[in-house]
């Protein structure tokens, strides 16, 4: 079905779907590693790219393509490439656009491993990086060098909820021919469309909101145009970052309910954030939907809604934070985010524990920071759970 002229929710249900020989309402899982050629000439034509068809699953598979086409359409991109994980998507971008002697600028509080891998593996490949607070566009300007090739943003950033002005950052980068990639995991295309704001590449950990059911790990990279797509495709196909068909099929199913899941989670998150902000044992709350968020106005302009991620600080620091986490019963004490279940975690001892305390503090991640991914349970139950846990702080 051609869904190009349809609304977002119709695209969520139908985009990427193709006619199946048996008329199935849901396309089957092509759980196969390889595809038969009709004869030698057919195989030759497929390899030469003279005829469309499938050869081998690492190079392309109908189930994976259905998901890729759907997400590319939702992000208003040219095409997309599914990857085995969100980190495979991140590394696809790094490998496609950074060569020996190149430099990258990124936000100081991006997803931990996105920075960790850049500072651990890429110096050995001759790639330099500078991490600054990108929520202040002047810092990006100052970090630009003659060899800067990539501006890698994440907004809202994990877990400080810092918001970078995508249009403003794109204007600065494009003036110097620097590509802009946005990790859009926290928003999903339902809340934010970076390509519409000028970004060249968008990526997701589909493990989070896009799949939304905490039952797969996966990623995707979306390119604005064919040239960028071809560079990304070379990496995915030849490094072997590709998805598995079953993983892609589950993700396509999860994607169908993206908007209604986010609507509910966001509605809950607004109430939870207000509850936390008025709680005597809570020091501060960072949520783009609260007027107290330092970039509340920018969030309203750039995002369709504040999302479902909240960071907050408990009075009493590390010890109090641990007590809260040990006393929640409904929320799961677990990393990850964007699923239907409420998750709670503590970055200083978990996701960002590999950074030094100084590096964490520089990135705005204090010891008392607790991160909450609000789910779609009854909001009264979520609030009661937090209220109970906070009584131990
Ligand atoms: C989880 C996450 C990633 C990494 O994705 P995986 O699927 O865990 O490999 C990248 N960026 C952000 C913002 C994330 O939350």
Image (cartoon, rainbow, N blue to C red):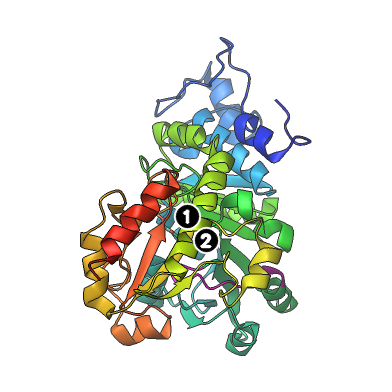
Camera-side residue: 312 or 124?
A: 312
Dividing the image into four equal quarters, which quarter contains ligand 1?
bottom left
Image vertical order of residue 301 relative to residue 73, above or below = below
Residue bearing the label numbered 2: 93
Camera-side residue: 164 or 269?
A: 269
| Residue at position x 50%, y 48% in the image | 265
Residue projecting furthest to the right: 5
| Residue at position x 28%, y 74% in the image | 354
CB of residue at label 1: within 8 Å of ligand 1?
yes
Please state the horizontal and vertical placement of residue 256, each as a whole percent of the image.
55, 34
Please state the horizontal and vertical placement of residue 99, each as a whole percent of the image.
51, 71
Q: Are marks 1 and 2 in contact (CB under 8 Å)?
A: yes
| Residue at position x 63%, y 18% in the image | 19
Can you tell which quarter of the image residue 305 is in? bottom right
Residue 152 among those drawn in magenta: no
Please state the horizontal and vertical placement of residue 313, each as a whole percent of the image.
37, 74
Question: What is the span of residues highlighted in magenta in the rendered image?
Answer: 157-167
Q: CA separation, marks 1 and 2?
A: 6 Å
- Quarter of the image where the N terminus is located: top right
Camera-side residue: 214 or 221?
A: 214
Q: Is residue 177 left or right of residue 100?
A: right
Question: Badge 1: few (under 14), some or many (20 or more) residues near its Cα, within 10 Å?
Answer: many
Q: Is residue 115 left or right of residue 164?
A: left
Residue 220 appears in the picture as rendered: no
- Quarter of the image where the C terminus is located: bottom left
Can you tell which quarter of the image residue 304 is in? bottom right
Please state the horizontal and vertical placement of residue 274, each as a whole percent of the image.
50, 64
| Residue at position x 74%, y 78% in the image | 175
Q: Name the dominant secondary structure of the magenta segment.
A: loop
Residue bearing the label numbered 1: 89
């Amino acid at each position: 079905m051609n869904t190009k002229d349809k609304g977002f929710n119709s695209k969520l249900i139908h985009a990427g779907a193709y006619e199946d020989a048996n008329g199935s309402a849901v396309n089957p899982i092509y759980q196969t590693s390889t595809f038969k050629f009709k004869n030698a000439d057919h195989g030759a034509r497929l390899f030469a790219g003279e005829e469309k068809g499938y050869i081998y699953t690492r190079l392309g598979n109908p189930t994976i393509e259905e998901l890729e086409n759907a997400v590319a359409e939702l992000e208003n991109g040219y095409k997309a490439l599914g990857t085995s994980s969100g980190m495979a998507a991140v590394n696809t971008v790094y490998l496609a656009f950074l060569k020996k002697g190149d430099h990258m600028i990124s936000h100081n509080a991006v997803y931990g491993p996105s920075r960790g891998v850049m500072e651990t593996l890429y110096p050995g490949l001759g790639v330099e990086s500078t991490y600054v607070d990108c929520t202040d566009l002047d810092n990006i300007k100052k970090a630009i060098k003659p060899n800067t090739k990539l501006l890698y943003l994440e907004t809202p950033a994990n877990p400080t909820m810092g918001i970078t002005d995508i249009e403003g950052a794109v204007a600065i980068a494009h003036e110097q021919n620097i590509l802009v990639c946005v990790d859009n995991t926290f928003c999903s295309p339902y809340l934010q469309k970076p390509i519409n704001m000028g970004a060249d590449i968008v990526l997701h950990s589909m493990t989070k909101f896009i799949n939304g059911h905490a039952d797969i790990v996966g990623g995707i990279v979306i390119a604005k145009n064919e040239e960028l797509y071809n560079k990304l495709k070379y990496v995915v196909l030849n490094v072997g970052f590709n998805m598995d068909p079953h993983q892609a099929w589950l993700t396509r199913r999860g994607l169908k309910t993206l908007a209604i899941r986010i609507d509910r989670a966001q509605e809950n998150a607004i109430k939870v954030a207000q509850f936390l902000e008025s709680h005597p044992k809570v020091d501060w709350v960072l949520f783009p939907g609260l007027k107290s968020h330092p970039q509340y106005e920018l969030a309203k302009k750039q995002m369709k809604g504040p999302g479902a991620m909240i960071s907050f600080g408990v009075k009493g620091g590390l010890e109090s934070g641990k007590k809260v986490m040990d006393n929640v019963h409904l929320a799961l004490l677990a990393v990850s985010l964007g699923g239907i279940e409420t998750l709670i975690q503590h970055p200083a001892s978990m996701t960002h524990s590999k950074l030094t305390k100084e590096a964490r503090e520089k990135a705005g991640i204090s010891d008392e920071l607790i991160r909450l991914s609000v789910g779609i349970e009854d909001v009264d139950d979520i609030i009661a759970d937090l209220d109970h846990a906070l009584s131990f702080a």
